[in-house]
Image (cartoon, rainbow, N blue to C red):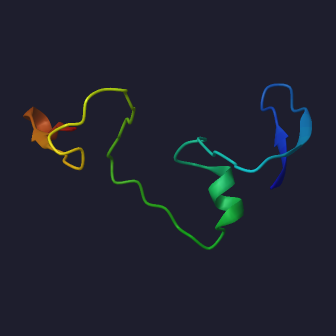
Amino acid sequence: MNVTVTDRDSEQAEKVTARVLLAADGVHSSVRQQLHPDTSFHWEGTRMFRGTAVREPFLDGATMTLIYGEEEKRFLA
């Protein structure tokens, strides 16, 4: 993949060649807009945070649990 990356602070542009483009540029993603210009996006107010950790599998390793708390807060493990 060939992309041009522009630093928002300095406005300097650099051409980069890579196998993967990881676009973590948020809800108003300019990358998504360029790759999928005909796709609309509607934010429904959910914020999700994800992470990984090296540890023993949870139950059978293919299991998850969703815990509901106060004020519609949820925890997914």
Locate the N terminus by quadrant. Answer: bottom right
Q: Provide residue 27's location: percent of width, then percent of height.
A: 52, 47
Q: Is residue 5 above or below residue 9?
A: below
Q: How many marks?
A: 0
Left or right: 41 in relation to 31: left
Q: Please tell me which residue is depicted at 79% across the width and 26% down the height of the picture.
A: 9
Q: Is residue 11 above or below residue 35?
A: above
**Nearer to the camera, 14 or 40:** 14
Locate the C terminus by quadrant. Answer: top left
Q: Is residue 61 above or below residue 9?
A: below
Q: Please tell me which residue is depicted at 15% across the width and 44% down the height of the picture.
A: 66
Q: Provide residue 14's location: percent of width, then percent of height.
A: 91, 38
**Nearer to the camera, 44 or 15:** 15
Asked which quadrant contains residue 25, the reply is top right
Q: Please tell me which residue is depicted at 55% across the width and 42% down the height of the picture.
A: 26
Q: Provide residue 69's location: percent of width, then percent of height.
A: 9, 35
**Nearer to the camera, 38 or 74:** 74
Q: Please tell me which residue is depicted at 10% across the width and 40% down the height of the picture.
A: 68
Left or right: 21 in relation to 59: right
Q: Provide residue 21's location: percent of width, then percent of height.
A: 69, 48
